[in-house]
Amino acid sequence: MSDNSAAILSNNLIYSAMIFYTLAFFAHAVEVAWSVKTPANSVKKTKLDFSQTDRIGRLASAFMILGFLLLLPGVIFRGASANRVPWGNMYEFSITGALAFSAAYLFALKKYKLRWLGLPVSLSVLLTLGTAVTLLYRPSAPLMPALKSPWLVIHVSAAIISGGVFLLANCIAATYLILDRYEQKGLRPIWTEKLPSLETLDNLSYRLVALVFPLWTFSVIAGAIWAEAAWVDIVTGKQIGRAHV
């Protein structure tokens, strides 16, 4: 397969993944909206009925998995088209970050049963991919010589993994703040009764941040080392740029 064909295939796979993430978003939206059942004879006796939305919820999770399975080869073929790791610019960083974010969510979905996070996660992934393909897209090309370093792989891979987990933790923390505001004013709205308690959300967000913070710290250190190696002239030893954190 030629480099140009690999680049075209990568674009098609990413667009296909966006379709499934869009379907997942709408399916999760329907799940949330139809989880609330209000009897016609009494508004005050509103109760929840999740049995009608379990199937659409499982369908939404299937769409998220299919989107991930399409995005993964899309990222791989992007790297194959340039004969390098697919982290050479902000477009590639964004699509790989969306992949890491999706992987973190699917892992949490399997381990902690966090299907209620599907709505904000699918929306966040869509916004990331939409921004990447519309504003950040760059044609596939080799890296400039100054950036060719093993530290590129080390630094950016650590940043992408930690960034994906951080984004998941941010979604959970944002949910916590919204629910906390509701509870300070009184009871939760009916549509939020399906969500976990504030203590559960706080503990989960804390665990995710604590888990990935050392990796993020390492990525910052590796970035400084990479910048120092990349922006120093090998022949003269004269610094031509600044390592920055």
Image: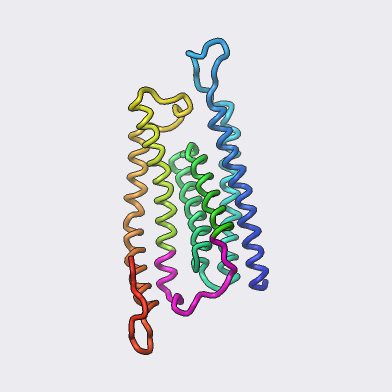
80 or 226: nearer the eye? 226
157 or 235: nearer the eye? 235
64 or 185: nearer the eye? 185
Q: Residue furthest top?
A: 41
The vertical placement of 173 against 89, above or below, is: above
* Whole-percent x, y for residue 223 in the image: 36, 68
- What are the residue bounds of the magenta stretch? 136-156
Residue 150 position by quadrant: bottom left
* Whole-percent x, y for residue 118 in the image: 51, 41
The vertical placement of 161 against 187, above or below, is: below
Magenta-span inclusion, residue 139: yes
Q: How many marks?
A: 0
Residue 25 position by quadrant: top right
* Whole-percent x, y for residue 112 in the image: 43, 40
Q: Residue at x 53, y 72 (%)?
A: 84
* Whole-percent x, y for residue 128 in the image: 52, 52
Q: Residue at x 58, y 58 (%)?
A: 133
Look at the image and tell me in which quarter the C terminus lies.
Answer: bottom left
From the viewer's perspective, is 207 left or right of 15? left
From the viewer's perspective, is 26 left or right of 118? right
